[in-house]
Amino acid sequence: MRELFRRVIMMSVITSILFNGYLYGQSDSLPPSEPDSGAVAELDDLDALLELADKDLNQLSQVQVTRPSIAPSLDTVVSTVERKESTVGRTPAAVFVITNDMIRRSGARSIPEVLRMAPGVQVAHIDGNKWSVSIRGFGNRFANKLLVQIDGRGVYTPLFGGVFWDAQDVLLEDVERIEVVRGPGGTVWGDNAVNGVINIVTKKVKDTQGTFVEAGAGTEERSFGSVRQGGQISENAHMRVYGKWFDRDAQASTTLHDDYRQARTGARVDWSAGADDNFTLQGDYYDGSSGTQSVFGTAAAPYAGLNVFDEALSGGNVLYRWTHDINNDSDWRLQAYYDNTQRKFENVGAFYRRDTLDLDFQHRFVAGENHEIIWGLGYRTTWDEFQAQPYFLSLNPGKENFDSVSMFIQDTITLIDNQLFCTIGSKVSYNDFTGGEVQPSARLLWTPTDRVSTWGAVSRAVRTATRVNRDGRLVLPGVQTNPFPPIYPTVSGQSSIESEDVLSLEFGFRHQPVDEFSWDLALYYNEYTDLIGITTPAGFVPGPEGLTAPAFFDNNGNARTYGAELGTTVMPMDDWSIRTAYTFLNMDMSGPNTSSPGDNPRNQFYLQSSHQITKEVEFDVIWRYVDNLPDQHVPSYSTMDLRAAWKPTDWLELYVVGRNLLDNSQPEFGNDIFAGTQATEVQRSVYGGLSFRY
């Protein structure tokens, strides 16, 4: 009888503990009971449970389940939102982190393709080497409301605005993570961080020691290869060098000229001087060409013609960073970089070069018991040169130098210890294009448990005018008007152009009820004013090309957008993970803007299943749905990618990737009326490769 009673008590205790453990996994809001001193039992395994059966009944009533550590998904490191290291769960912004393993298992060969994983990001191929990449709308080749950085080095171009994505490449093996922040980031990052910030963070050198070699080929990826060697210079210094190249075929047809090839090399050295000072020196150089088809105006009938040419691109950069730790609560960082980029439009007669020198300083410290303050100063100077192309684009002056200076301060206030935080701050800047700018924000974060995070934010950010907006003259293809001379529509810049402005309201909720499931929801509403559009031509005037219909860039547009972004992660088994991302976007615009709601998909869905079938075999499936782009004449589409990999040893991996498998070819974006770029369709492709890590 005593043994039966003992077993009943034991099973009751086990059931109660398991049930309470499950509830703690579902919600940490259930408080653990306070045990008496010396009576706490940590239940780590079944043996510990069985031992409880031999304890007295009064001891059994005092058993406590150890509270689990912070949820894995919410514990992911981020540093972009507040310019300090934190975690996703402690971040009052919509942020998504793409890890190195996610990149590897996606089979992607370029940064834009990797960015498709993140909710809220719209990515579309224009042709084989050009992309439209935007966040929360306003998509086109030069999406000018998105700030992109590589290890803190800005790659936004002030010529058209946006990013030349064909010039932005890294060794994906050495990327630690890509932080995708949706929403304004102007308070800490300054101008042009209107709808988001993308920060590509590469690994520390000490994490890339040894040899890495990769090579492969396929139908569209005609050939590619990479090599990287890392080594130790001294006890406190490490370095790595790398080289890579690729050759990509033209899309959809051999008669189209949008092939793409590039070689790149670089090196990085990390070293320390004592325990408090860490230094980084790194640099890259690249050279390649991007095939292009563009329609420009011509002097003879039909006054418009297709130009087929290569854009020869080259450039390099050097970055230096010094970080000093004052104590556990205080540090400062000094960063400087120089960047050069050049593009020669062969057979067209145009050339563009830009040099940038950027200096950035920030200091973090704690004031009192509840304030963590970060402040900083920045200076940037840029000088460029543009050789005009007749019947397309000219800049006056052709050479220009412009500067910007800035200062920011941000205070994170702890309102309730470890639960409620308020972050307020602002950036004040001055630039030669639009003068002074102020970009404030206020954010509130509530973390009632380690597995729940709720945040809200109100922010203002600005997008400064570009060289073309201020100094450019864009000539569109001529229109035949027999018996009169042809008319060439033209768009000219104005020195009085002002910055675009956004006021953004955001709300987010994150929850990881159990280690195997998490979800992250962000909602937003944005009001845009002074958007730069184009005035309606008024009459005709003589011009260098003939009769012209002049129009001008002007701040004559407004917009309202709202949307929702949802990301989930599910692990049905330890060796199987499923990630999804859903994006909803609604845009209402007024005025003659250079972008329209019909340039952006209203709905997007991304699903990736990654299964470790055996210790040596991986299998990944990616399915994407993208809504139609009515103004780009692109229908909605679904597509699928597959990746299979075999790792017979720890140092060798063989893989094969199939991309865009549901159709022979499909368009993702339309022609560019301003640059004249002719879009091509994305083609089904297969490639295989091997990688060696030692």
Image (spheres, rainbow, N blue to C red):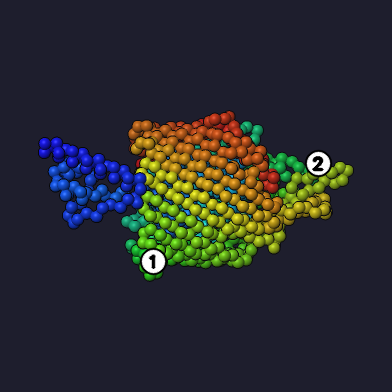
Picture coordinates of residue 624, whole percent (x, y): 52, 37
Asked if residue 338 can be seen in this view, the reply is no
Residue identifier under label 2: 301
Q: Is residue 312 left or right of residue 225?
A: right
Image: 446 above or below 602: below
Residue identifier under label 1: 370
Image: 36 above or below 301: below
Image: 265 above or below 446: above
Which secondary structure lies at badge 2?
Answer: loop
Q: Nearer the viewer, residue 526 or 609?
A: 526
Q: Amino acid at mark 2?
A: Ala
Q: Amino acid at mark 1?
A: Asn
- Residue at 48 percent of width and 54 percent of height: 93
Q: Nearer the viewer, mark 2 or mark 1?
A: 1
- Residue at 32 percent of width and 47 percent of height: 24
Q: Is residue 317 left or right of residue 675?
A: left
Q: Nearer the viewer, residue 475 or 3?
A: 3
- Residue at 80 percent of width and 54 percent of height: 538
